[in-house]
Image (tube, rainbow, N blue to C red):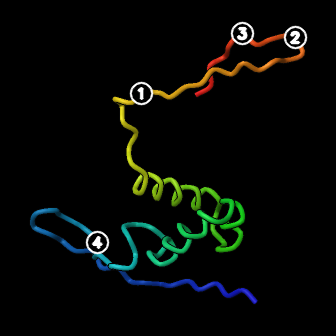
């Protein structure tokens, strides 16, 4: 049996003398996200094991939401590419029905 829980959390609007109008910060609900921190962490772990579509069906989220969570995880966890190394390309010497390929570049 599947249970879906929706929380109606009142969030107060505050008038800050420095920032102006702002919303109360809730630790377990990041920003304007409708996904709690715990659900986000669970999705991040599942995406490393299952395809995005399967995770989306499992947690009952839209696949685009799961993909966005995964992209943010990858940007956070993977190091930025080193521009000094450059592109590590290979040449594909494949043969097609028309004859040998003209050395297409594969990056």
The percent position of residue 82, horizontal first and vertical second, equals 36, 36
Q: CA distance from mark 3 to mark 1?
A: 23 Å
Residue under label 3, please give it: 102
Q: CA distance from mark 2 to mark 4?
A: 64 Å
Picture residue at 69% right of the left edge, 60% below the top: 51
Depicted 27 relative to depicted 61: above or below:
below
Picture residue at 69% right of the left edge, 22% below the top: 92
In the image, which is nearer the foreground, mark 2 or mark 4? 2
Front in this rendered view, residue 37 or 103? 103
Residue under label 4, please give it: 23
Dot 2 or dot 1: first in sequence order is 1
Residue under label 2, please give it: 98
Quarter placement of the N terminus: bottom right
Dot 3 or dot 1: first in sequence order is 1
Dot 3 or dot 4: first in sequence order is 4
Mark 4 lies on a secondary structure that is: strand
* Label 4 with label 1: CB-CB less than 8 Å: no
Q: CA distance from mark 2 to mark 3?
A: 11 Å
- Location of residue 47 (image quadrant): bottom right
Front in this rendered view, residue 39 or 30? 39
* Label 3 with label 1: CB-CB less than 8 Å: no
Q: Is residue 75 left or right of residue 101?
A: left
Residue under label 1, please give it: 86
How packed is label 1: few (under 14 Cα within 10 Å), some, or many (20 or more)? Answer: few
Q: CA distance from mark 4 to mark 1?
A: 44 Å
The percent position of residue 71, horizontal first and vertical second, equals 51, 53
* Label 2 with label 3: CB-CB less than 8 Å: no
The percent position of residue 91, horizontal first and vertical second, equals 63, 20
């Amino acid at each position: 049996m599947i249970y879906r829980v929706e929380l109606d959390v009142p969030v107060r609007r505050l008038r800050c003398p420095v920032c102006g109008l702002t919303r109360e910060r809730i630790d377990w609900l990041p920003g304007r996200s409708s996904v709690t921190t715990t659900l986000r962490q669970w999705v991040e772990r599942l995406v490393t094991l299952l395809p995005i579509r399967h995770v989306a069906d499992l947690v009952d989220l839209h696949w685009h939401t799961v993909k966005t969570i995964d992209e943010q995880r990858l940007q956070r966890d993977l190091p930025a590419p080193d521009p000094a190394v450059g592109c590590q390309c290979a040449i594909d010497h494949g043969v097609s029905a028309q004859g040998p390929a003209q050395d297409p570049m594969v990056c």
